[in-house]
Image (tube, rainbow, N blue to C red):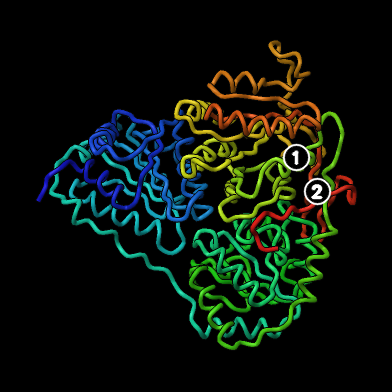
Amino acid sequence: MPRMTAARAAVEILRREGITNLFGLPGAAINPFYSAVRAQGELKHVLARHVEGASHMAEGYTRAKAGNIGVCVGTSGPAGTDMITGLYSASADSIPILCVTGQAPVAKLHKEDFQAVDISTIAQSVTKWAVTVLEAAQVPGVFQKAFQLMRSGRPGPVLIDLPIDVQLTEIDFDPDLYVPLPIASPRATVAQAETVLRMLAEAEHPLIVAGGGIINADAADLLVEFAELTGVPVVPTLMGWGAIPDDHRLMAGMVGLQTSHRYGNETLLASDLVIGIGNRWANRHTGSVATYTKGRKFVHIDIEPTQIGRVFAPDLGIASDAKAALEVLIHVARDGAPLKDRSEWSAACRERKRTLLRRTDFEDVPVKPQRVYQEMNNAFGPDTRYVSTIGLSQIQAAQMLHVYRPRHWINAGQAGPLGWTGPAALGVAVADPEATVVALSGDYDFQFLIEELAVGAQFNIPYIHVVVNNAYLGLIRQAQRGLEMDYCVQLSFENINAPELNGYGVDHVKVAEGLGCKALRVFEPDGILPALEQAKKLMVEHRVPIMVEVILERVTNVSMGTEIDNVIEFAELDGVQNPIPTASGLRD
């Protein structure tokens, strides 16, 4: 039996589990692992500037492609605690990432050794499993179990903490004998599917709510097939956006208090049966349960049994992987289940989609943010991968951008950590180096973890970062209206080095250029599209991140509300609209 260090065994297992890329920072307590990576020679490594940034890169990498698992590596102590936000974000959105940390020697864990922290206990509530390995011989089994856990049931992250002496200890291990453990997921039965189809036959105005579980299960094609077979319109959640193309005749719009369409909310309110597949009934999607559920029945299909009934009790709950559920639903539907003509209902949904639009064609200076999304739709095609996290920029982007493919809207949905966008976009660009990756941030999100731009410059990871700058914590300012205050949310100041910014504060162009990137700034609406077109050329030419900053009006109240039947439309409606373009080659 070959002998090798436990660290080398861990690296060999990573390769046999399909890992090709790592994101992280070396340090004294994890250096034996890095030595094994270097000796093994096949794994690529991106050196982050902050371990939290590395964890978000790993998230973006996972989210970009079915089957990916991003791996984040750091040393002992603060490296692990820096990963916690990334673990939380991944756990909240059911994203598998593996975080590997170094640790003090086993004999010193209880002696307050330098940078010795009980990271496995700290990480327990935001992982599927967090473990400090105390015996070197357990390392192969721990990694084997970690990959099984990350992929089984509801996906999620795992943290493995490796004391330095455990890493250095030699063990008997033959990589050629290693086999990944089987993955178990629940499957819907034919009887359950028949019940769903009977409920569907009894309904007049049914909808499918398509959640992120459909994306995770790589089941978007099956979703569209089932919708077309039954004629039932589809409402994607924010995490499920792209599961059905925006221009599909059965795409009925998103529902919610913030990241929603007027037509989506109106269609949900007109429905009498909702079939949720792979979704959580998140509160920003539903608003109050009383309003959301009144007058309609619900089916909830989710891979995690305890998720069913967590927010409200459905009329029928089915524990199943989304792909398995759609396969059996399609089988039953094709096998003679009664299917109604839904043409009148779907036509009504399309009419709402055609008419209940928000205006985007503003000519104002300073720029209104709606115009930015209009020009992004004009500049970027259906293959664009958008990345965003939180704020008025993300909310309005979800209201106004168009997405045509699964995994082409990549968003930290539940956690929404500021600073996530940039490093996540780098992870997406590593996973799909030929894609046009477009990140979208407000100025505050951009300033968090801004140092990671240097990673893109150093490793030639190109993407476009659109920054909408109003020198405000815009979402928090809008929330403070209810308390009649505007407190600690202004980012504006007179920058003595950039008087041309007229009080907008940080000179993002100089910062981005100082970090090795290219940067453009736009003050007028007619300059947005040319800047975006130039950014595409610069990205190809220089292979580094390209920032496009648009200076916005200071205050914009974005459409949102407290209930799905009470979303306040602050801006003008029914002006010249930006229609949903039909992407070439897609069903319409």
Q: Give percent across and percent down for residue 269.
A: 78, 68
The residue that disc 1 covers is: 375
Reply above or below: 2 against 310.
above
Q: Residue at x 71, y 75 (%)?
A: 206
User: In the depicted view, which residue is nearer to us: 116 or 338?
Assistant: 338
Q: Residue furthest left?
A: 1
Residue 424: x and y, percent? 53, 40
Say which element carries label 1: helix
Q: Is residue 153 above or below residue 157?
A: below
**Residue 566 vertical position relative to residue 137 in the rendered view, above or below:** below
Badge 1 local density, few (<14 within 10 Å), some, or many (20+)? many
| Residue 293 position in % (x across, y down) | 72, 70
> Along the line of sight, which residue is nearer the eye, 581 or 302?
581
Which part of the image, by quadrant, shows the C terminus?
bottom right
Evaluate whether residue 345 shows in this view. yes
Q: Residue furthest top?
A: 496
Pointer 2 residue: 578
Label 2 and label 1: CA atoms lie apart by 9 Å
